[in-house]
Image (tube, grey):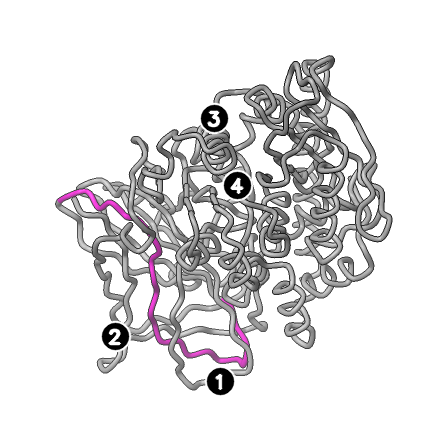
Amino acid sequence: MGHHRKALRTTAVGAVSATLIAGSALGLAPTAQADGGGIRFVDITGDGGTVLKANVVTPQGDDGTRRYPLVVLPTSWGFPQAEYLVQARKLADTGYVVVSYNVRGFWQSGGQIEVAGPPDIADASKVIDWALAHTPADARHIGMAGVSYGAGISLLAAAHDNRVKAVASLSGWADLIGSIYSGRTQHVEAAAVLDGAATLTGRESPEVRQVFNDFYAGNLAKEQDLIAWGKKRSAATYLDRINRNGAAIMLANAWGDTVFPANSYTDFYEKLTGPKRLELRPGDHATPELPGLFGVPNDVWTDTERWFDHYLRGQDNGIDREQPVQLKSRSGGGYEGYPDWKSVAATSRKVDLAGTTTIHANVDSGADGGVVFLSSILDQVAQVPPMAWIPLLPRRWAAVWQSEKYATAQRIRGTGKLHTTVTGTKENGTFVAYLYDVGPLGVGKLVSNAPYTWYGRTPGKPFGVDLDLFSTAYDVPAGHRLALVVDTVDPLYLEHNPSGAQLTFSSPAEDPSYVSVPLREQ
């Protein structure tokens, strides 16, 4: 396990290096472009006296007599303070004061990385205080936005500071534990990417370092501590406060986000009671937003500006009258609008998982969720998701069920659900479920997946499992089948199968096994 984890971390650091090269470019090109355009680089005193490096962009030709809406942009994990300069300039040109700051613990800002802990939340309020005292910002019209880490901090700030009236949370999380520890399974490659970036560009607090170590070790004794640590850093924990404060919340994410799966946002979105919008489109973590950071016209940033224009500037641009849930299928086509998340799937179709199948653990069958970042980027730009040749998957290590061929296209929208009965030969275990679109030649394209881990079960005693697959939008062509594949090893996740473990999947007559596939009306 240690060697496996080390290999994952080496891979992750390589991926992070590429990300940081992009981040460095962002830190250089926009700065040169923006010189002389009302930009100041400043130091802001954050919580506990920690110095936060920041930049301020003000409207052109400001004569000091007007007040402007304020937008605060916390940086992404591992990115420098110049990350948002292109978007900040665009916002300022339309009448905003924009303050972007490097979150504590990264680059030249002081302090240590707290992973959106209480000091980070307090920092956001300190930045607002500073902006109101040192810029022509209007205290009545304050918004926050960010990508990834900045998205999570923005949502948390809206819960703790009622001055925040609008938020655009892009590729972030609402439930940190539900994102990186779903199904009680460590999403180890995603964690390694974050850890690697923090090591290269920042300074982890001792608490954060210990959390990462316990996470990699699969330390069950620390599980409740991990959950409590994550809840403190999750907007879902403070849902009542967010609803009470009434900020207008826009959430945007990618279907293939390997760091913060879309499910975290969809569940949270349904429980928001104020003005809200949910956008989901193809891609991986933060990849839909990245072109916009370079100034490339971009749907996410365009809608972010429209969101702020309406809720901070009072502009009647119609965004409040559009269907609030906007989805773009991974299979192509334009945006689809829905009144709410539950309306996305008009119906569902079950694929029966009949019979009894036993698989051996500890060997990767070849069915995998892909590589963090890379796989879903390929899906985004070329519609090439992770693939497996279903007929050749070794049945010793993979359980496979297939539907009949569909006469018409199946427009999958929403969250698939697996219901099955499992019997393990050991107390603990892990499996990963994959839903594939299988073409005439047997090549399966990954539609969705999710991991599941259990502890302390009586060996040989069956137990029921209900598992939500990661939400998606995917069109299965006519003449294709769906396949549900289960195996026990995937490089994306930490597995907990003791050596020699076997798992049996059954479908008792009184409680049949199935996967429920959510479908849009034809």
Left-right relation of 206 to 83: right
Q: Which residue is mark 3?
A: 298
SS of the residue under disc 2 = loop
Kind of residue at disc 3: Asn
Q: Position of residue 127 (x, y in %)?
A: 73, 42
In depth, the one of 483 and 99 nearer the eye is: 99
Q: Which residue is mark 1?
A: 459
Other residues around mark 3 within 10 Å, as few (<14) / some (14–19) / many (≥20): some
Mark 2 vs mark 1: in front: 2
Residues under labels 4 and 2: Cα distance? 43 Å
Q: Which disc number belongs to residue 127?
A: none
Q: Which disc number belongs to residue 512?
A: 2
Q: Is residue 347 magenta?
A: no
Q: Relative to 66, does residue 205 appear above or below in the rendering? A: below
Looking at the image, the residue that sits furthest to the front is 65
Residues under labels 2 and 3: Cα distance? 46 Å
N-term mark: 2 or 3: 3
Q: Position of residue 76 (x, y in %)?
A: 66, 40
Q: Which residue is mark 4?
A: 168
